[in-house]
Image (cartoon, rainbow, N blue to C red):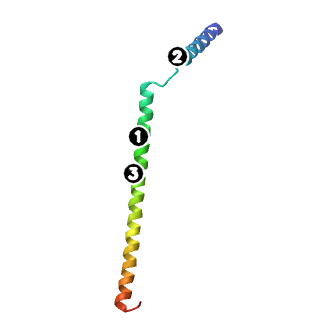
Amino acid sequence: MRSIISKLEQKASDIAKVSASNRSAFTLVELMVVVAIMAILGALVAGVVVKAIEAQKKLEHQDNHGSHQICTFKAVAGCD
């Protein structure tokens, strides 16, 4: 029984050595997966940036509109 286990362990270590020595670069599938993940993350970040810019423009518009109303009120009321 021990001889069978030791033979299996020896084969496993031989396979690991061969796999490690033959594997010197990424495969095309691995590269494509990495590129796909990066594209998804980029799309998510771009969406967040666009929403932030829209929110900033909305706030600026509201601020400008409020200032305009205050100036109109002062002009009508005669408060310079």
Percent across and percent down for residue 46 are: 41, 49
Q: CA distance from mark 1 to mark 3?
A: 12 Å
Tag 3, which secondary structure? Answer: helix
What kind of residue is marked 1?
Ala
| Within-10-Å neighbours for mark 2: few <14, some 14–19, many 20+ | few
Pointer 3 or 2: first along the chain: 2
Quarter of the image where the C terminus is located: bottom left
Q: Is residue 75 above or below residue 5?
A: below
| Within-10-Å neighbours for mark 1: few <14, some 14–19, many 20+ | few
Q: Foreground: 29 or 78?
A: 78
Query: Residue at coordinates 45% horizontally, 24% vertically from top-left?
Result: 27
Query: Residue at coordinates 63% horizontally, 8% vertically from top-left?
Result: 1
Query: Residue at coordinates 65% horizontally, 9% vertically from top-left?
Result: 2
Tag 2, which secondary structure? Answer: helix
Splitting the image into 4 quarters, where does residue 33 fall? top left
Q: Is residue 49 left or right of residue 23?
A: left
Pointer 1 or 3: first along the chain: 1
What kind of residue is marked 2?
Asn
Q: Foreground: 13 or 44?
A: 44
Q: CA distance from mark 3 to mark 2?
A: 41 Å
Q: Check residue 47 in the rendering and tell me which mark sits there, or answer none.
A: 3
Residue sitting farthest toward the front? 80
Question: What residue did someone put label 2 on?
Answer: 22
Query: Residue at coordinates 41% horizontally, 36% vertically from top-left?
Result: 36
Q: Is residue 58 above or below residue 74?
A: above
Q: Check residue 39 in the rendering and tell me which mark sits there, or answer none.
A: 1
Pointer 1 or 2: first along the chain: 2
What kind of residue is marked 3?
Gly
| Within-10-Å neighbours for mark 3: few <14, some 14–19, many 20+ | few
